[in-house]
Amino acid sequence: MSEIIIIGGGAAGMMAAVFAAKKGNHVQVFEKNEKLGKKLYITGKGRCNLTNACETEELFNAVCRNPKFLYSAFYSFNSQDVMDFFEKEAGIPLKTERGNRVFPRSDHSSDIIRGLQNLMKKYGVTVHLNTEVESLIASEERVRGIRIKEGKKEILCDQIIVATGGLSYPSTGSTGDGYRFAKSCGMKVSPCSPSLVPLVTKEDYIPQMQGLSLKNVSLTIFRGNKKVYQDFGEMMFTHYGVTGPMILSASAYIGDQTEKGELKAELDLKPALSPEQLDQRLLREFEGNKNKQLKNVIGVLFPASLTPVFLELCGSSPDKKIHDISREERSRFIHLMKHFPFTITGRGEFKEAIITRGGVSVKEVNPHTMESRKVQGLYFIGEVLDLDAVTGGFNLQIAWSTAYLAAQAAGNERE
Ligand SMILES: Cc1cc2nc3c(=O)[nH]c(=O)nc-3n(C[C@H](O)[C@H](O)[C@H](O)COP(=O)(O)OP(=O)(O)OC[C@H]3O[C@@H](n4cnc5c(N)ncnc54)[C@H](O)[C@@H]3O)c2cc1C
């Protein structure tokens, strides 16, 4: 039996605690918040998209950084294992929705947290809330224990699992402490940036549409003349840019490029219709409304808050009568519907990012055990590692799988 300390009681920390304690180790979790799983609580808009019910090979395609590092982790504890764990061991019924996204059937993330807490209790895990770990104690390339902030108390142990998360949504407790711990042991930390984050735009007309949500639109992003990204889905305008599922995914692929300069973007507002079909549609609409004003007719094609911006960009007077619209003007409408432009100048901040890109370098961590290659008995799991994936339950799958591996490995040496 080993004395194992887990720093951080988020998704990864709680899962590791369950499996490490189940093996008969004495496990203590140190969490600086007043409760466990603060970030887990807000995942999936409070519903917790806990994994993705895809084939294991497909999990790798969803990982943006260092997918190969996850080979052992995903094959040792795949999404089916996660579902079995929550349904059979934690007793939480699950359901699978569009895109293989898995949620608790109750739609309450709190059920997932409660399930993990119950299992931690069952296997005798000791939880210390409101207890911030300040530093690690290590000597001769081996961990010895931790020092907690209040009272500078030292607690000795055989193994430490660092599950402190990244830098995103720092209000949930993830403030990058794990990076400091890694650096203090001579480990490398790759530069961090926010990912799965809203994008900042340049044009004044974008904030005018704040709150407007568009479904079934297509997005294309260019660097210069080169197409760098394309997707189809749902998005929303904000007071400084764009957000929504399609934009968050885009940020994972082109976010880093925003640091090198502006990117041009275009929306196809009617991707299901060719320009010719759109022209027919416009003609039909115009035919029966010849004496009406443009603003009242074009409005049937778009949501209300898009119409003034659209007409301004076309250079058309909203009060113009339909019978005065020229063929040229109609072509301008069609072009704008297929190529609605905006410029991406940057990405949002950590406080609104779903995930952190960068973190503890995976080159310094054994992919079969999650143990540091520099310091014996020191493990890193979850978002603190330089791993990130797109939306769809994949980031939590990374947390669960890496936690499982570390829990299997930690405690082995003294058994
Ligand atoms: C709004 C939002 C929605 C999301 N939705 C989803 C989703 O539906 N599906 C999905 O797969 N992913 C989702 N994610 C991502 C997912 O939440 C993270 O990938 C996951 O929580 C990472 O788990 P973790 O345990 O590594 O870190 P965290 O969950 O961040 O946990 C880290 C814990 O460590 C504690 N801690 C930090 N430093 C110390 C210290 N020094 N001492 C003691 N304790 C410390 C923190 O307080 C925190 O509780 C979402 C993220 C956000 C922000």
Image: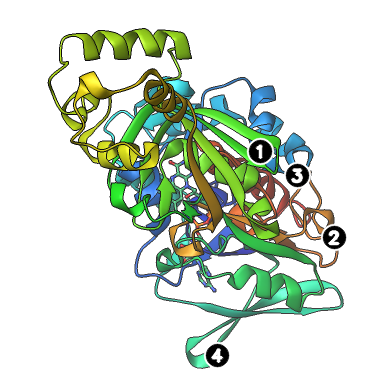
- Of marks 1 and 2, which one's residue comes earlier in the chain? 1
Residue 390, given in percent of the width and then of the height, sits at: 57, 39
307, 137: nearer the viewer:
307
Q: Judging from the image, what secondary structure is the residue with disc 3 in?
A: loop
Compared with 316, 100 (above or below) is above
Cβ atoms at labels 1 and 3 below 8 Å apart = yes
Inter-mark Cα distance, 4 to 2: 28 Å
Inter-mark Cα distance, 4 to 1: 39 Å
Amino acid carrying mark 3 in the image: Asn
Residue 413, given in percent of the width and then of the height, sits at: 79, 55
Mark 1 residue's CB less than 8 Å from ligand 1:
no
Q: Residue at x 52, y 85 (%)?
A: 149
Cβ atoms at labels 4 and 1 below 8 Å apart = no
Residue farthest along the bottom direction in this orientation: 151
- Horizontal arrangement in the rendering, residue 293 relative to residue 268 (left or right): left
Q: Residue at x 31, y 14 (%)?
A: 282
Amino acid carrying mark 2 in the image: Arg
How are the colours assigned in the image? Answer: rainbow
Residue 67, given in percent of the width and then of the height, sits at: 73, 39
- Of marks 3 and 2, which one's residue comes earlier in the chain? 3
The disc at residue 66 is 3
Inter-mark Cα distance, 3 to 4: 36 Å
Which residue is identified by label 1?
63
Amino acid carrying mark 1 in the image: Val
Residue 337, given in percent of the width and then of the height, sits at: 41, 27
User: How many residues crowd around disc 1 within 10 Å: few (fewer than 14), some, or many (20 or more)?
Assistant: many
Tell me which corner region of the image, top left, top right, bottom left or bottom right, holds residue 290.
top left
Which residue is identified by label 4?
152
User: How many residues crowd around disc 2 within 10 Å: few (fewer than 14), some, or many (20 or more)?
Assistant: some
Which residue is identified by label 2?
373
Q: Nearer the viewer, mark 3 or mark 4?
A: 3
